[in-house]
Image: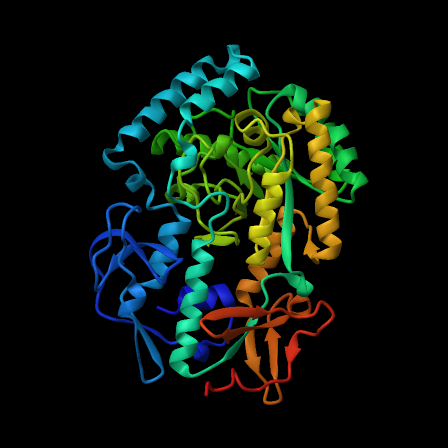
Amino acid sequence: MNEALLNYYRCPEDAVDLRALGEPTGRRGYFRFGPDTLCFGQLSSGDPSNTVTGELHDAMEDVRMEQSACFLPFDPGSLVDNLRCERYVDTLFPGGTTLSQQKLFRNVYYLLRPALPASVRALLKRASLRGWDKIPFPQWPVDVSVERLLRKLLASSMRAKGLDRVPFIWFWPEGYSSCALMTHDIETAAGLHFCPSLVDIDDSFGIKASFQIVPEKRYHVSESFLSGLRSRGLEINVHDLDHNSHLYSDAKEFRRRAQKINAYGRQFGAKGFRSGVLYRNLDWCEGLDFSYDMSVPNVARLDPQPGGCCSVMPYFIGNLLELPLTTTQDYMLFYLLRDYSIDLWKTQIGLILKENGLISFIVHPDYVMSPKARKTYTALLQYLCQLRSDANIWMPLPGEVDRWWRERSQMTLVDRGDGWAIEGPGQERARIAYATLRGDDLVYVPPERSSPASAPSRRIGVPLA
């Protein structure tokens, strides 16, 4: 019952005591946990809904607090996994009719795609996405249901224990407030040829990015091209096999393609993977021999495959670390929304910053070659540089986030008698923060960047009056 919360916060084990209020049974469905937190899963009391619209049962009303323990009518880990792994998606289209239509459209589209100009492709995609702004869940333009749920669970446990604050290992190294990633997926030969110019643009702002390479059919990648990227301090990852819609078409086909993808990963020295067009099946991820994946959007309103992980933080799927895409892709912004401002990106960044989350971008070299698109991208880089300074944002490569998140997952907070200390690999970069109750809300007191990885307060928290 406590594992999901402890893994997320890396707080002392005795700060959390969540217990089951009966065995969750029956069908999975939607319900609320407080007025602003939507959940999907089973309940031991109350009736979850088949649909996300309408009046939903509030499971907060069923919570019981006894003997310093918080009793819940659901399994927290199951609810978190249901959102992160998109297990709610089939309920968005009752009967599956719309999903079937989307699969048919996808197959026809990719059959004709090589002969279609970009303007026609965009027109067809806009037609297939009609009504995207009316979809009730996940929440647009950023969904933080996972973060809200975990925050409320910690607050409930603290109230049960009579604590007003709890120390935890801060989400990012060295006290950074949030993290921002820039990634570039290369889709065509024209995009490949534009990469050196794109690297020059990034370098002019002091930003390093990862480049995702399609290994077959789209273009030829020379060793000199790859070594040129590496020499400039950039990362290389594998982007699908041939960037069509067939990677997850069926299990046998996936296994065949995954073997070739894994071989290319070894050949490129790649630690990360991203599927074409963000198609995904998280139940099959164990077939990918990579350290991290970047194929799951936070909210997939504009993507061919609906859903979204409803989280702005990295999370593990087995041993694979997922670095979710938390902002709108440049293609969707320019060609589907026909927006060449950075207003939507700024809105998404602001929402993610409130959760101290991961701000991740896909910007294709293929779609920023025009002066108009390049101007928009340059404005984004300028804004990120401003945030790097003003908001204390960490801007690493994806592989650095992967290494940090794995190290953090092995760290522990230890009471040494005169205060708290962090132990584990990478502890010198870690910082201690506090989760504090303020009225009905749980707020974070982040560390100072210069503060050491220890804190003098021996107690977990101060008893509530």
191 vs 125, left or right, is right
Write down the quadrant of residue 444 in the picture.
bottom right
Q: Nearer the viewer, residue 218 or 21?
A: 21
Where is residue 64? Give x, y as percent: 29, 75
Residue at x 69% of width, y 57% of height: 391
The answer to whether residue 222 is visible is: no
- In the orientation shown, which residue stands out farthest toward the right? 204
Q: Is residue 82 above or below residue 274?
A: below
349 up-or-down from 411: above or below: above
| Nearest the eye: 400 or 334 | 334
Count of labels in the image = 0
In the image, residue 89 lies at what x, y percent? 34, 41
Q: Residue at x 43, y 54 (%)?
A: 145
- Residue in the image at 69% along x and 64% along y: 174
Q: Where the N terminus falls, by quadrant?
A: bottom left
The one nearer the camera, 334 or 227, is 334
Task: Please indicate whether residue 444 sits to the left or right of residue 64 in the image.
Answer: right
Question: Is residue 390 shown above or below 190?
Answer: below
Q: Nearer the viewer, residue 82 or 234?
A: 82
Please tell me whether residue 215 is drawn above or below residue 447 in the rendered image: above
Residue 271: horizontal and vertical position, in percent? 59, 44
For image coordinates 38% across by 45% down, the residue present is 86
Question: Residue 198: x and y, percent?
Answer: 73, 31
| Colour scheme of the rendered structure | rainbow
